[in-house]
Image (cartoon, grey):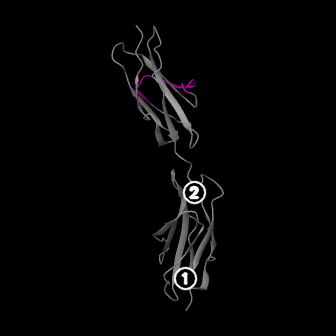
């Protein structure tokens, strides 16, 4: 007898923001006990590229998939006598690549006599995924806390005056659906007296 197609579990059909090294899992159908499973995954529907031949009901991909790409996956069960049909393929889309690190522009590091409503400016990352926005970290400690988030801009102007003759620290990170990229190296400046 031929084993029935397994029931696909994860990644769920039509799932998004899936890791680029996902764990595929499925459950065996009732009836004939399989001696193993063949796992398929690629950008075709149905998938034709076999990525694993395993005896357990899960498999974690070791070679990363492409970012922000739709894939199809399926599994078939087999015995020493026969190979079953593939389960109806599920599709999923992988996460976006994290954005790279922004480059801080102004105020220059260790600037002195900065006005009390300065504009922080930076350049977009030159690597990684496209940023959806930026997180600005600002404060009077060397590891500043999150101040605010901006989108569609690579600058931030303070609307409320900062304190006179005070050293402030700042940095910026870029983020997107994949998560938050690395923060730029922290800079400091001191406001005017």
The residue singled out by tag 2 in the image is 131
Question: Does the residue at mark 1 contact the one at mark 2 (Cβ under 8 Å)?
Answer: no
* Quadrant housing residue 126: bottom right
Residue 117: which disc? 1
Give above or below for 26 relative to 21: above
- Residue projecting furthest to the front: 152
Residue 121 versus residue 34: which sits nearer the camera? 121
Dot 1: element? loop
Q: Magenta stretch?
A: 45-58
Query: Dot 2: few (<14), some (14–19), or many (≥20) neighbours within 10 Å?
Result: many
Residue 124 inside the magenta-drawn segment: no
**Considering only vertical position in the picture, is 89 above or below 122?**
above
Mark closer to the chain start, 1 or 2: 1
Whole-percent x, y for residue 121 in the image: 61, 71
Going by the picture, which residue comes out furthest to the right? 126
Task: Give the quadrant of the N terminus.
Answer: top left
């Amino acid at each position: 007898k031929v084993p029935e197609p397994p029931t696909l579990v994860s990644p769920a059909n039509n799932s998004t923001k899936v890791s680029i090294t996902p764990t595929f899992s499925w459950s065996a159908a009732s009836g004939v006990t399989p001696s193993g499973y063949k796992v398929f995954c690629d950008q075709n529907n149905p998938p034709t590229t076999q990525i694993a031949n395993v005896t357990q009901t899960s498999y974690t991909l070791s070679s990363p998939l492409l970012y922000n790409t739709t894939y199809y996956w399926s599994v078939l069960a087999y015995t020493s006598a026969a190979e079953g049909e593939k389960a109806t393929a599920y599709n999923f889309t992988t996460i976006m690549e994290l954005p790279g690190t922004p480059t801080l522009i102004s105020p220059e590091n260790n600037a002195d006599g900065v006005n009390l409503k300065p504009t922080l400016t930076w350049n977009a990352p030159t690597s990684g995924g496209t940023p959806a926005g930026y997180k600005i970290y600002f404060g009077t400690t060397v590891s500043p806390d999150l101040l605010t988030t901006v989108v569609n801009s690579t600058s931030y102007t303070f609307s409320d005056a900062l304190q006179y003759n005070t050293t402030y620290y700042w940095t910026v990170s870029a983020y997107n659906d994949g998560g938050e990229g690395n923060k730029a190296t922290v800079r400091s400046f001191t406001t005017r007296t």
